Amino acid sequence: MARTAPKWRPYSGDLVMYMALHFVLALIWIGSAVMLDLRFRNNFASASVEDRLTLMRGIRSFSGKTEMPITILLLVLGAILLMKNMAWMKVGAMHGKLTLALVAIGLLHASRGVMRKMITALESGENADDLAKKYSRMRMSVLGMLFLISGMILGVKAKMGMPNTFQVLF
């Protein structure tokens, strides 16, 4: 039996609000991830131990204030959007997006654990270069998944002839 695309219908006011908030929060997560990763890559290798410690504490603090709450809100808003239009559950790309999103969130949390180990190692005077490489790989994986998720959703909506979030909002 052939799968059918979700039936597109004009979006109601509350659905547009949820979509807009989900979209804006995703942009903030991607923007903060890029900013934090660039800050780490540009400053960690050449910094002294004290500067590395200050850098990692700053990154951890900012990540805790942006990425952590945003991931929770994105999951809640995503669940609301799916409940409002269950037809999306028939689209295979949505299953891929949800899986990648959960893996990205898990890797984000795991990278924060590595970051905590880096801070502990730096505080005790140990070498944290191996942990820094692991942290960097994890963060690049998260960022890659975020861009892949964005491309998947834009591609699926374009293939189905559905308006993307830009078209709905503006």
Image: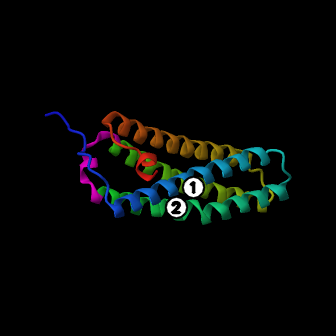
In three-dimensional space, the C-alpha distance between marks 1 and 2, rounded to whole angstroms, equals 8 Å
**Which residue is located at x 73 percent, y 44 percent?**
41
User: Looking at the image, is 100 positioned above or below residue 118?
Assistant: above
Q: Position of residue 21 (x, y in %)?
A: 46, 60
* Residue found at x 43% / y 46%: 167
Q: Are marks 1 and 2 in contact (CB under 8 Å)?
A: yes
Please indicate whether residue 110 sits to the left or right of residue 47 in the image: left
In depth, the one of 160 and 103 nearer the eye is: 160
Residue matched to label 2: 70
> How far across and how far down the image is residue 35, in percent?
67, 50
- Residue 73 location (% of width, % of height): 46, 63
What amino acid type is highlighted by mark number 2? Ile
Main SS of the magenta segment? helix
Q: Secondary structure under badge 1? A: helix
The N terminus lies in quadrant: top left
Q: Which residue is mark 1?
A: 28
